[in-house]
Amino acid sequence: MKKFELKGEVRDGFGKKAAKAYRSESLIPCVAYGGNDEENLNFVVKNSDVRNLIYTPEVFLVDLDLGKTKFQAIVKDVQFHPVKDTILHIDFLHIFEKKPVVIEIPVRLEGLAAGVRAGGKLSLDARKLRVKAVPSKLPEVLVVNVENLELGKSIQVGDLQFEGLEILNASNAVVCRVQLTRAARGVAAKAE
């Protein structure tokens, strides 16, 4: 899994007034949950530093450097302004090598589906899947091979197996499918 280095400063101001003051200085209030002492760690990061971490479909292990404190974390939640779409707050989850973590990993389809060759249209229904694994077993993407996917068929979560991780989505949830297009229906109707 890709790593992302992020520097921040521990913050001492809390509440709406302090958060507004931080945001006016282009700083984003953040919190890290789940540390060794189970206390939340509050800090701020520069808005420009997190752009490549947040505005991407990729998932990263974040190496947080807060001066005296350094640890690995993942982004758990991001809160955006409802109108301006600027980042208001970021929640991180402190991770440990032996402790499983739950995270959403992007799905990538691989291969040319048999149903597409027959005139169908491939659609990706689940862009990300929720998985549980120890950090060393987390992949960058979940690769799903669709070469044997026939026209009108789908691949569900229950059909997928990945080594070292557990998929938490419902087993009957559709990941991708090959749909019959109008043109393919017209060809099938003429053939009959």
Image (cartoon, helix red, strand yellow):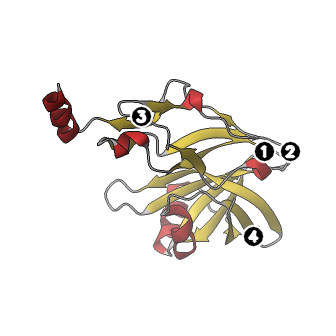
Give coordinates of residue 99: x percent, y percent: 82, 42
Give coordinates of residue 26: x percent, y percent: 50, 74
Q: Is residue 167 left or right of residue 96?
A: left
Give the residue at x 79% y 52%. Answer: 136
The secondary structure type at the circle numbered 3 is loop
The residue singled out by tag 2 in the image is 98
Label 4 sits on what residue type? Asp
Label 1 sits on what residue type? Val
Dot 2 and dot 1 residues touching (CB under 8 Å): yes
Task: Single out the mark in the foreground, 3 or 2.
Answer: 3
Above or below, 76 against 161 in this view is below
The residue singled out by tag 3 in the image is 150
The residue singled out by tag 4 in the image is 65
Give the residue at x 39% y 57%. Answer: 81
Label 3 sits on what residue type? Glu
Give the residue at x 40% y 36%. Answer: 177
* Viewer-proximal residue among 118 and 145: 118
The residue singled out by tag 1 in the image is 134
Which is more N-terminal, label 2 or label 3? 2
Dividing the picture into quadrants, the one containing residue 192 is top left
Q: CA distance from mark 2 to mark 1?
A: 6 Å
Residue 179 appears in view: yes
